[in-house]
Image: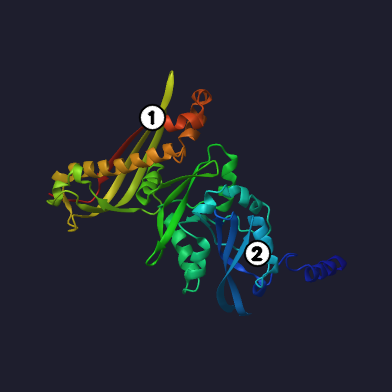
Amino acid sequence: MKKVGTCLILLLVLTGCWDQMRLRDIHLVDIAGLDFDKKNGEFKLSFAVTQIKNAGQGGGEAVTETTELKASSLIEAIGQGEYKEQGPFLASNTRLFLMSEAFASNNPIKSLGYLLHAPYTSINAPVVVYEGSVSEFLHTEVSQDDFSKKVNRLIASLETNGIISNVSMMHFILSKEDELEDIALPVVRPSDSGLELGGALLFRHGMSTGIKLSNEEIRLVMLMLGRNIGMQKITGRLQEDKGSAPSAGGSKGDEFAFSVKKVKSKTAVIPKSGSLPTASIHVQLAVNVYQIDGEGHPFKKKYVQQVEKEFGQYLQSVAITAIEKLQKANCDLLDIGDRIRAFHPATWEALDWRTDYPHLPVDLKMNVEILNTEAE
C-alpha cells in the first residue's frame, strides 16, 4: 500500500511535460519568410503568426499577423524578436519556409544550419522558393481570408498530385553533406488567384544553380523517376512541325489532354571501356486521353498507333530539354550517379563525377500506350 500511495502522489506531482506551452501562449508560425537584400547585404525574416485569441475550452479565434525582422545575419534578425511585441521567434509549428530567390542564391544553408539544433523548430516543414520579395508578399497578402491556409494547401497539393516532391528543411540542410544529394525546390509566383507553381529551382550540393525547370519539365522528371502518385493530368499542344493526330481530323498544333494511369521507368547504366558510360532511361506510360482538338471524342483503333507516336515524341522532346538543363546545372536529379556508385563501383572510381556528369550520354526512350480507344 505504501508503494501504491507513493505512485499516486508522483502521478499528481509529475503530470504534464517540463517544457509544455499553453495554447494561448503559443505562436503558430504559418509561414516563415526568408529574404536577402543584395544592395545592403541585409537579411529579412518575415513570419506570418497565427495566435489563438479568446482561447477557452474547446476553441478560440485564430488571428494572423506579420512581423518583419532585419539584420546583417539571419541569427541576429531572429535575436531581435526577443524585443518585439509578439515575443521570441521560436518557429514553433512552422508549416512552411518560404525563401526568396535572392536568399536562395546566397548560400542559404550557411544561414539555416542552426535550425538543426534550435528548440521548438519544425524541421520537417517544406521549403519553397518565391519569385520576388517574400516580405512584401506576406505584408500585402496576409490580410486576405484563409491566406495561409490557401498557400499551404497549394504546396501540399503539388506532392499529393505527383507534380513535384516537397523537400523538408532538414532534407535541404543535410543535402550539403552528401555529394550526390541534388534537389529541386518548388518555385511559386503571384497570380490573379493568389499563388501558382512557377517551375523548380535546381540545387547542387546545397547551392542554387540559378537554373529552373518549367512546370512541364519537372512533371517529366517525376515520370522519368517512375513517380505518378496522383495520376497526373497533362495538357498541351502538339508541336506544329510534328503534325497532328489524324484521328482528330484537324490541323497541326492540336490541343490535347490525358491522365497518366500507370508509369513504368527503368534506368540502366552501360559501362564503356575508355569512355564515359551511357545512361539508358526507358519510360512506359499508360494513359487515358480525354480530349484532343477541343472535341473530346474517343479515338478509333486504326489511328491509335500514330496518336501514341505523336504523344511519345512530344513528351520525349520535353524530357530531353529537362535532361539538358539538369546536365547544364550539374544537378543529378535523376539519381544516375547513385546508380553508378551502387551497381558499377569500378566505373564510379574512374569518374570525376562533377566534371563528367554534364557530358554523360543519356539515351531516352518514351513510349505511350492509349488505354481508352473506340471499338471498331
Quadrant containing the N terminus is: bottom right
Q: Which residue is mark 1?
A: 361
Image x and y of residue 359, in percent: 42, 30
Task: Give the left or right position of residue 20, taking residue 155 as reference.
Answer: right
Mark 2 or mark 1, earlier in chain: 2
Image x and y of residue 311, in percent: 25, 45
Q: Which residue is mark 2?
A: 89
Q: Secondary structure at mark 2?
A: loop
Q: Is residue 191 above or below residue 316?
A: below
Q: Is residue 242 above or below residue 44?
A: above
Are there few (<14), some (14-19), or many (20+) residues within 10 Å of tag 2? Answer: many
Q: Secondary structure at mark 1?
A: loop
* Residue at x-position 46% and y-position 29%: 356
Looking at the rendered structure, the kind of residue marked 2 is: Phe
For this rendering, which residue is in front, 157 or 113? 113
* Residue at x-position 40% and y-position 55%: 198
Image x and y of residue 261, in percent: 32, 50
Image x and y of residue 46, in percent: 57, 64
* Residue at x-position 48% and y-position 70%: 140
